[in-house]
Amino acid sequence: MAITAAMVKELREMTGAGMMDCKKALTETDGDMDAAVEELRKKGAAKAEKKASRIAAEGLCKIVSDGDKKAAVVEVNSETDFVAKNEKFQTYVEEVANQALNSDAADIDAFLAEKWAKDTSKTVSEELVSQIAVIGEKLSIRRFQRVENASGCVVTYTHGGGRIGVIVSADVATVNDDVKEALTNVAMQIAALNPKFISEADISSDYIEHEKKILLEQIMNDPKESQKPEKVIQGMITGRVKKELKEVCLMDQVYVKAEDGKQSVEKYLEQVSKQVGESITIKEFVRFETGEGIEKKDEDFAAEVAAQLQ
């Protein structure tokens, strides 16, 4: 497969690696972008590893709630930021979120196929087509998720006018303002630091083994570290995995509002639990970030205008 300059540019933006490293990785993986990212990680050349961490599409994440027991979040994408800020588009996204809140659909295909609540003569997909015609730009309902906790508490947090949407569900016997405030703080934590798991107990052995393999290959590609004894290398891997897990596990992360700069989210919730006299246990969280994992097309308006004039 021919490796283009655009592919090298995309991989470089995704990983922060050097241009020649990116070109070599793409050549070795026959242009497979995800495999090239893995290759750069193994060589220690990637500064950023996840394609999903990039904000590369326009649109909006919208959350709607039904009291403190149920909430839903949707992501609807548009081609331009101009449309994303349009009141008509924002109203439509809220309608989609309300649809999701009361939907029984298990996946996006089923969701698009169900009847549109505001006009049951149409499906959700057909209403989307209608909105595209009205707004004049390609739109996409990318994903949705509902969260319910009848015996606990569900809180939501939206950041950046809809750039990030977070829902947190917790098991707690009594729901009051102090509990909601604490869970909202946790939702802000999730928005800011993007954890992947609640705690280490939620991490699969496959994930840990995969990370160990990546770290081992990084070490073996380092002229100095690769010469160390096997026991030392394994100790290095164990230490680095432990450090990484503290970054990806919500309960182990340093609480963003910690006064001492050290308190973990777990210790913060223990502190609040003592204050309110109720145990607060995070059961589930959802974090949507607009455009994560979608590559935004390059636009050259000068070239576009020149082409139209010709």
Image: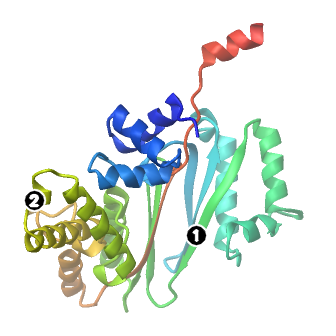
Task: Count residues near mark 2 (Cα–Cα under 10 Å), then give few for <14, some for 14-19, many for 20+.
Answer: few
Q: How far apart are marks 1 and 2 (CA)?
A: 48 Å
Helix, strand or loop at label 2? It is helix
Q: Residue at x 55, y 47 (%)?
A: 294
User: Which residue is pictured at 64% across the width and 14% down the height?
Assistant: 303
On screen, residue 193 above or below 280? above
Q: Nearer the viewer, mark 1 or mark 2?
A: 2
Residue under the image location 36 percent in, 32 percent down: 19
Q: Which corner quadrant of the image does residue 66 belong to?
A: bottom right
On residue 78, the disc is none
Q: Is residue 153 left or right of residue 117?
A: left
Image-based side of 21 in relation to 60, left or right: left
Mark 1 element type = strand
Report the residue at 57% width, 29% height from top: 298
Q: Which of 20 and 171 is in front in this view?
A: 20
Q: Where is residue 162 in the image (x, y as percent from the top left)?
A: 50, 50
Rendered image quadrant of residue 306: top right
The residue pinned by badge 2 equals 227
Residue 116: where, in percent of width, then height?
81, 64
Q: Can residue 279 be seen in this view?
A: yes
Along the viewing direction, whichever of 74 and 271 lies nearer the viewer: 74
Q: Nearer the viewer, residue 52 or 206?
A: 206
Near-viewer residue (32 or 77): 32
Q: In the rendered structure, which amino acid carries the disc numbered 2?
A: Gln
**Circle 1 residue:** 145
Q: Which amino acid does label 1 sit on?
A: Gln
